[in-house]
Amino acid sequence: MAETILNSEFPEPPGVARSAALMQSFAARMGRQGRRVVLITSGGTKVPLEARPVRFLDNFSSGRRGAVSAECFLRTGYGVLFLHRARSSFPFAHHFPPQTWLAALRPTRREAEAPGGRLLLEAEASALPGFADALLTYQEAAEAGTFLAVEFTTLNDYLHLLQAAAQALNPAWCVGSSAMFYLAAAVSDFYVPASEMPEHKIQSSGGPLQITMKMVPKMLSPLVKDWAPKAFVISFKLETDPSLVIDHARRALKTYCHQVVVANILESHRSYVIIVTKDSETQLSLSDEEVGKGMEIEGKIVSNLQSRHMAFIDEKN
Ligand code: 9Z3
């Protein structure tokens, strides 16, 4: 059972209880509003190799898929719980890295009468295209309480927060089948158990390094069976070998009995995915023209999945 493994081998990191409380009140608010809600996991995980960690095992995920998808879900009217790797792409902000606004924004004046002064900034709209729109959409969501971001860094943080998020979205007073899980984070499959970690920095004077890593428990199993059994659950499957990806997606559907796997291949994952269900395979892709217009594949993924979610809710009612 994943829960037992989490207790014995993955000690609860500080701050999880506080995040769990925030997620519970977010879920209750979404329930009261009768709003559909999506938990998006986003970004990679960091696995320490030493107890006082200097070195980590990490992966390539930038969190862009999760961030763009969060924007699409918010625009569609979903409440978004965004469980993301610290410093990975953040909805709305990732379109504007510091070098874009550092050059474009200019301080105009300080209003002396405001407490502490008030700094006014201005920019030519053409210098920051889309900035005002992004800011407004983000601030509207933050004010309406329809967006909650929770951060993780290590694998251990991620595992505990995912469990807390799933449990927050499960209660009957909350949302049941109106909750969607969109598990786009690239989670490490391997870790070094705390009991087997060297305490101090591994010394290179010891010669070439050999590490044996254990398998990370598959959280999808308790999530689907125990934590959020009524929810609409989507996992992602990434491969580098295109000949494996459909088989592996199908195997995941069979093993975990959830609703959808989004299959993608490293080289083409920004422009091509396959939505795999028990009885269908739907290819989604971006044409060169769509790429030229600045469209992103997440718009198509979210549109496809939200229709499937509606059908799922109708079927349950
Ligand atoms: C994905 O496949 C995501 O689409 C990406 C997005 C990580 C490729 P980016 O963050 O990339 O926009 O840079 N996520 C799941 C990857 C994964 O490791 N899945 C596990 C697997 O394939 C199962 S949960 O075995």
Image (cartoon, rainbow, N blue to C red):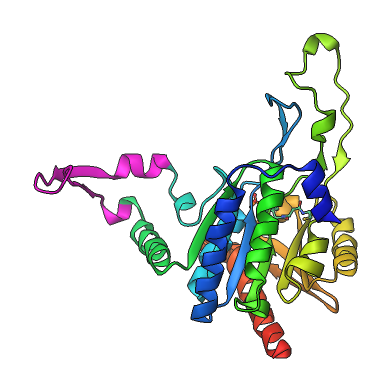
Q: Residue furthest left?
A: 113
Find residue 45 and report its image quarter: top right
Nearer to me, 221 or 119: 221
Taking the magenta stretch, the answer to whether it contains residue 35 is no
297 in relation to 113, above or below: below
155 in relation to 23, above or below: above
- Answer with left or right where residue 87 lies relative to residue 186: left
Q: Which residues are magenta?
A: 98-126
Q: Residue at x 82, y 36 (%)?
A: 193
Nearer to me, 245 or 57: 57
Q: Residue at x 78, y 13 (%)?
A: 204
| Percent x, y of residue 60 | 69, 42
Q: Residue at x 60, y 52 (%)?
A: 17
- Answer with left or right where residue 224 lies relative to residue 307: right
Q: Residue at x 55, y 59 (%)?
A: 21
| Percent x, y of residue 144 | 40, 69
| Percent x, y of residue 82 | 57, 58
One can see residue 72 in this view: no
Instruction: Assign the N terminus to one quadrant of the image.
Output: bottom right
Nearer to me, 92 or 192: 192
- Answer with left or right where residue 286 lies relative to residue 282: left
